[in-house]
Amino acid sequence: MPLDPESVGLIERLRRAGVTNVSSLTVAGARRDGLMLSGTWALDDESVAIIAHLSRFGKSPTTVIAAATRLDLAVVEQLMEELQRAGFVRCRETTPEDRSWVSLVSGRRRVRQDITGVLADLISEDPHAQAVELEGAEDHLITHGVSVRIYRPEGGGADPLPLVLFAHGGGYVTGSIESYDSLCHSMAELSGCAVASVGYRLAPEDPFPAAYDDMVESLRWLIEHHRSLGLDTGRLAVMGDSVGGALANAVAFTAHREGWARVSLMVLIYPALDTTMALPTYTQFPDGPVVSAADMAWFYAHYAAPDHEWTSSPIHNPDLSDAPPSLIITADVDPTRDDGTVYADMLRAAGNESELVNFAGTFHGFMQFAPTLTTASRAQRLVADEIRRRLTGS
């Protein structure tokens, strides 16, 4: 099961940029220099130049972008469409002949390690650079140290929007709202639903069960304030990648068991669902190209959840009844692949609806790299279509 050529090229590019496995770093080093799967790491130089221009100067027509970046107009037009689908830019059409665009990468809100070093340098070194307000999203402080960013699709209208609660990955130790900004923008645009990304507390400063507690509290807060936020929490999905998949799963089961919410869909993206790491792919792919088995052990040691704790190891949940319908995405060359595969089988055996989709030739974290990886764009569209179908019926 080799990586496909696009993935091989991307991994080589990341390694040349100095990206390394977190298990060889300190916690501070992992947050500073480890692989933050923000997507912009792997964009081609032309796309980086476009986003850098928009981050400096704000709304710009396509012709101005082409002139400023010295790219062919047809190339810019194609790249703008791809970057829009991937959640990096948004169209502000003025005339059909020459559309204007804005960046969804906020120069003010993004920390340096969450964006490509090239883009960070371009923004910080330009004396005329100005921070551009983040479009299509708003931040809310839930409690001290916990915030939620709500993303809305362009042209969402005045009616309350269905809600997708998102839990980011990063092994409970790294990751942030910012590092998943483009993915959440993309999911909101493609699905037509609001996406609420939770900035939960991280280990080792805040070990188990802090992340789980913060996710539950955030969903409760969103439900409590849904009217003022313009959200229809009666149409609710949960989604998470890597350890965020375990958190999303735990929130759904908690809400169902306690009776304060019903989840219509659970999306688990290459989920990490077993802190004991007992399944075969941990030994089959110990040196996963982006996330290794050693990395997962490093993450779990810092989070310090008890073995077989169901909120962090759903595979050991003794009662899988009353689970919401689920879509589980796995990556082919990934130590955690069996977590998703086995869990889908367990959910179905317990009488639940669960669809499993494995993407051949891919690695843990691949969905963050649209539009660089065509497979990532295809996976994002598949997930968004299922969210739309479950929450809107369209």
Image (spheres, helix red, strand yellow):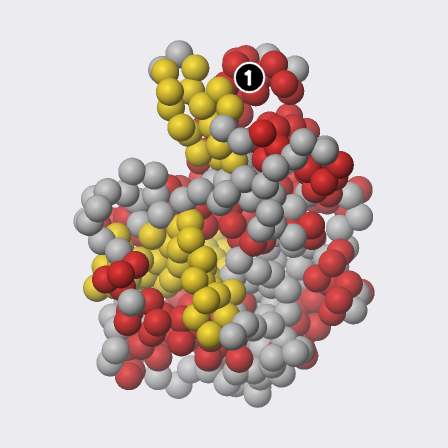
Indicate the quadrant containing the C terminus: top left, top right, bottom left or bottom right: top left
- Label 1 is placed on what type of residue? Val
Residue at image x 64%, y 69%? 173
Residue at image x 31%, y 77%? 255
Residue at image x 68%, y 37%? 123
Q: Nearer the viewer, residue 221 or 21?
A: 221
Q: Position of residue 313 (x, y in %)?
A: 50, 78
Q: Is residue 162 above or below residue 209?
A: above
Mark 1 secondary-structure assignment: helix
Residue at image x 51%, y 65%? 199
Q: Position of residue 358 (x, y in %)?
A: 47, 52
Q: Is residue 286 above or below residue 254?
A: above
- Is any part of residue 155 visible from this angle? yes
Q: Is residue 180 above or below residue 273?
A: above
Q: Position of residue 40 (x, y in %)?
A: 62, 41
- Is any part of residue 367 visible from this angle? no
Residue bearing the label numbered 1: 64
